[in-house]
Image (spheres, helix red, strand yellow):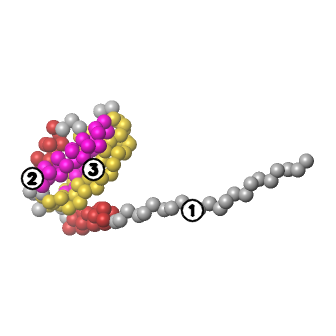
Amino acid sequence: MRHYETMFIVKPTLTPEEIVEKINFYKEAIIKNGGEICATQDMGMRNLAYEINKNKRGYYFVVYFKSAPSLVIELERLYRINEDILRFIVIKYESKKEQNAWNTMVDKVNKKAEAPKSAPVAAPETAPVAPEATPEA
């Protein structure tokens, strides 16, 4: 199995439920075609560097996975036929050095996902304010 990373940008006009549905569709497509998802990174809504199909923003999502090369062809086909995907890229990591970098990125994403959300910091208590002195005439 080879190491891959794919990033796709979903149209910003979709509802959050539709965006999650699209993301799950592609994750399921990877699994159904024999791939193994190692990590996912939800980058959220971001501004695009330039307009794509009159959209200035897009919802970014990254998936790190292992699979046979045939899966990439099917995944790219699915990206191309979906009008809600503005852009996509699939990157293959071949050499040992690239695979080590891929493993480092996967570990970093997984650690970030496992990190507990810090509790909100309580606002510092304010000291009572003394009333202003009125000038005596």
Distance from the alpha carbon under mark 1 to that under mark 2: 52 Å
Query: Camera-side residue: 107 or 24?
Result: 24
Please name the residue that numbered disc 3 is placed on.
61
Tell me the quarter of the image containing the N terminus: bottom left
- The foreground one among 11 and 90 is 11
The residue segment tinted magenta is 4-31
User: At 69% across and 57% down in the image, what residue appears?
Assistant: 129
Instruction: Check the image and report above or below for 23 versus 36.
Output: above
Q: Nearer the viewer, mark 3 or mark 1?
A: 1
Q: Residues within 10 Å of mark 3 (few under 14, many from 20)?
A: some
Q: Which label was assigned to residue 59? A: none
Q: Nearer the viewer, mark 1 or mark 2?
A: 1
- Residue drawn where x is 62% and y is 60% of the image: 126
Pick the residue in front: 17 or 30: 17
Residue type indicated by callout 2: Lys
Residue under the point 37% across and 45% down: 46
Tag 1: amino acid: Pro
Q: Which residue is mark 2?
A: 32
Determine the CA span between mark 3 and mark 1: 37 Å
Of the two numbered discs 3 and 1 on the same chain, state the one appearing first in sequence.
Answer: 3
Q: Is 131 one of the magenta-colored residues?
A: no
Q: SS of the residue at dot 3?
A: strand
Give the quarter of the image for residue 16: top left
Residue 69 visible in the current orientation: no
